[in-house]
Image (cartoon, grey):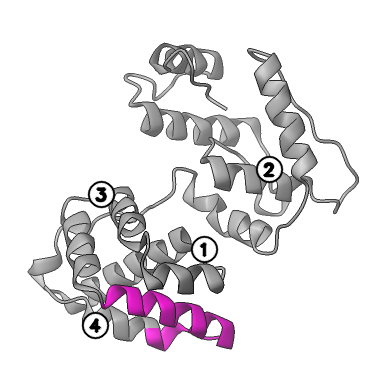
């Protein structure tokens, strides 16, 4: 097995100058033997999240960790991009060595919202008072609704995206331009997320109330769905 083909592929797709710098740091990471071995093990075991943990463990106290922090690289998204490119290159090679092609997904939120979330949080800063207020609300209430109110363009969706990214929460974003603003689409998406996250059984047609009831039975006493 060799992932050098993918390292070269990453060089070719690094378009803007900023991305080229960021990708170079990731390329240096993937030149490490431990990382190559960890990637291949995760690929063959269809365990991308396990790979992410191995990378984080490897980086602790490593000079590469300093480089990645200095460049403010979002490590998880870069590792996911590498895996996606690897699969593309592997498929083009038509080599049996890479089959079956795994689903390389480091995130627990839906793939259809990844680009939106990444774009929203790209230059996120501040708003700590909102997250502090939400934490206080959760600490004081066993259930309920926390509403963020503001005019268009003030950053409501960005706040939601940042929370989802940091906490890997179940989510759904209404996007009118894409037609993603109907109750059925929300339920379909949330159902898939909860079934995957909590290994729910016989829930393919469950309504929201039934889904939440099943999840509540899976949660440890100290945990919350959100």
Eye-nearest disc, 3 or 1:
1
N-terminal of the pair, mark 2 or mark 4, is 4
Give the percent coordinates (x, y) of residue 167.
54, 40
Q: Secondary structure at mark 4?
A: helix
The range drawn in magenta is 11-31
Q: Secondary structure at mark 2?
A: helix
Q: Secondary structure at mark 1?
A: loop
Q: According to the image, label 4 marks what residue?
A: 5
Mark 3–mark 2 Cα distance, whole angstroms, equals 27 Å
N-terminal of the pair, mark 3 or mark 1, is 3
N-terminal of the pair, mark 4 or mark 1, is 4
Give the percent coordinates (x, y) of residue 54.
28, 55
Mark 1–mark 2 Cα distance, whole angstroms, equals 18 Å
Q: According to the image, label 2 marks what residue?
A: 160
Q: Is residue 128 shown in magenta?
A: no
Could you tell me if the residues under marks 4 and 3 are in contact, i.e. CB atoms within 8 Å? Answer: no
Q: According to the image, label 1 marks what residue?
A: 74
Give the percent coordinates (x, y) of residue 1.
11, 73
Q: According to the image, label 3 marks what residue?
A: 47
Mark 2–mark 4 Cα distance, whole angstroms, equals 38 Å
Could you tell me if the residues under marks 4 and 1 are in contact, i.e. CB atoms within 8 Å? Answer: no
29 vs 100, nearest the viewer: 29
Q: Secondary structure at mark 3?
A: loop
Q: Main secondary structure of the magenta part?
A: helix
């Amino acid at each position: 097995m060799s992932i050098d083909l993918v390292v070269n592929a990453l060089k070719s797709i690094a378009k803007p100058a900023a991305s080229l710098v960021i990708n170079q740091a990731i390329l240096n990471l993937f030149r490490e033997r431990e990382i190559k071995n960890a990637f291949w093990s995760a690929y063959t075991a269809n365990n991308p999240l396990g790979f992410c943990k191995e990378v984080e463990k490897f980086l602790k106290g490593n000079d590469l960790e300093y480089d990645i922090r200095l460049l403010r690289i979002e490590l998880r998204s870069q590792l996911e991009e590498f895996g996606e490119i690897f699969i593309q290159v592997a498929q083009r090679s038509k080599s049996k060595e890479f089959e079956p092609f795994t689903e390389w997904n480091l995130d627990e939120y839906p793939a259809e919202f990844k680009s939106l979330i990444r774009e929203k949080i790209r230059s996120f800063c501040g708003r700590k008072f909102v997250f502090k207020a939400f934490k206080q609300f959760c600490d004081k209430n066993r259930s309920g609704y926390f509403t963020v109110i503001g005019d268009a363009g003030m950053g409501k969706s960005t706040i939601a995206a940042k929370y989802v990214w940091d906490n890997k929460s179940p989510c759904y974003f209404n996007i009118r331009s894409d037609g993603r603003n109907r109750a059925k689409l929300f339920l379909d998406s949330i159902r898939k997320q909860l079934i995957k996250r909590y290994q729910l059984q016989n829930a393919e047609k469950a309504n929201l109330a039934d889904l939440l009831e099943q999840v509540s039975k899976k949660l440890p006493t100290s945990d919350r769905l959100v």
